[in-house]
């Protein structure tokens, strides 16, 4: 899978994409992440400005349509799927990420300032995706989350193929609590069933604990288990 990220801060991504599994996925050639600086597509060679004031007034600035459209066109091919990370987008879920992961080439547009001129979206964006209902300073953090979530569906990125299916949210509910050595930590023990070696009982206990916690903390998720 190839991912092109269009933003004003290509450096922002160097940390998250250069460690751990996403780094290994790139080294193995399973994932290629490339960056474009929208500023390079400015129509203002002197100051490289890419923002302007909103028509109709209001606070803040907008990313101009021209630089955004040119940045997208510089990377898009016939197989590209262009996503604008946006608070107005369709909510990202495990199931939705699995659909996105079927694409060979993703182009991720990160918003800055108050957002992007609507005409750029109309002309070049295939889909708007949101990572959740909160205010961000830019769409860059959302792009990191999307790449992380989607990369796990790319065959070979996760060591164990089983782990993708096994992972709690793919199943639509929380994990059971986990414990490792030592057996007693600061006076706290481990649920005795985990020390019995009885795998049927352990599976039953984990299912119960996971269901109890999901129902308590995320009742809407609990009700949706059957739908996933
Ligand atoms: N955010 C809301 C309503 C209105 C604006 C915002 C907001 C970054 C460029 C967008 C935010 C959240 C999830 C991108 C939020 C996301 C963004 C995302 C994002 C700068 C304009 C902005 C949702 C609280 C009602 C700033 C809520 N997923 N504006 O955050 O890019 O992808």
Image (spheres, rainbow, N blue to C red):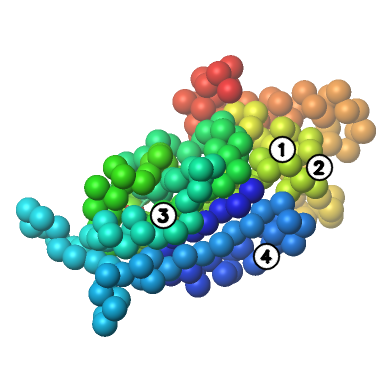
Q: In 3D space, how far apart are the residues under numbered discs 4 and 2 (Cα atoms)?
A: 19 Å
Comparing marks 2 and 3, which lies closer to the viewer?
3
Q: Residue furthest toward the right?
A: 197
Q: Residue at x 31, y 45 (%)?
A: 123
Helix, strand or loop at disc 1? helix
Q: Residue furthest toward the bottom?
A: 46
Q: In 3D space, how far apart are the residues under numbered discs 3 and 1 (Cα atoms)?
A: 34 Å
* Mark 4 residue CB less than 8 A from any atom of ligand 1: no
Nearer to me, 222 or 142:
142
First of labels 1, 4 by sequence position: 4
First of labels 4, 3 by sequence position: 4
Circles 3 and 1 in contact, beta carbons < 8 Å? no
Q: In 3D space, how far apart are the residues under numbered discs 2 and 3 (Cα atoms)?
A: 37 Å
What is the quadrant of residue 43 in the picture? bottom left
* Mark 1 residue CB less than 8 A from any atom of ligand 1: no
Q: Which residue is mark 2?
A: 160
Q: In 3D space, how far apart are the residues under numbered discs 4 and 3 (Cα atoms)?
A: 30 Å
Question: Can you say whether 138 is above or below 176 in the image?
Answer: below
**Looking at the figure, which quarter contains the C terminus?**
top right
């Amino acid at each position: 899978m190839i991912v092109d990220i269009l933003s004003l801060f290509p450096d922002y991504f160097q940390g998250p994409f250069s460690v751990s599994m996403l780094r290994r996925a790139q080294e193995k050639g399973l994932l290629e992440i490339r960056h474009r600086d929208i500023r390079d597509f400015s129509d203002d060679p002197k100051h490289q400005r890419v923002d302007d004031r909103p028509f109709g007034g209001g606070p803040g600035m907008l990313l101009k349509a021209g630089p955004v459209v040119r940045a997208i066109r510089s990377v898009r091919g016939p197989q590209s799927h262009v996503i604008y990370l946006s608070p107005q987008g369709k909510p990202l879920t495990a199931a939705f990420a699995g659909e996105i992961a079927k694409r060979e080439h993703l182009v991720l547009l990160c918003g800055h300032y108050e957002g992007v001129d609507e005409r750029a979206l109309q002309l070049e964006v295939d889909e708007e995706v949101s990572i959740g209902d909160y205010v961000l300073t830019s769409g860059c953090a959302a792009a990191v989350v999307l790449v992380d979530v989607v990369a796990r569906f790319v065959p070979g990125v996760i060591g164990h193929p089983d782990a993708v299916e096994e992972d709690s949210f793919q199943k639509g509910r929380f994990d059971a609590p986990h414990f490792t050595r030592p057996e007693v930590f600061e006076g706290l023990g481990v649920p005795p069933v985990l020390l019995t070696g009885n795998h049927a009982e352990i599976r039953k206990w984990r299912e119960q604990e996971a269901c109890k916690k999901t129902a308590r903390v995320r009742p809407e998720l609990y009700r949706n288990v059957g739908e996933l």
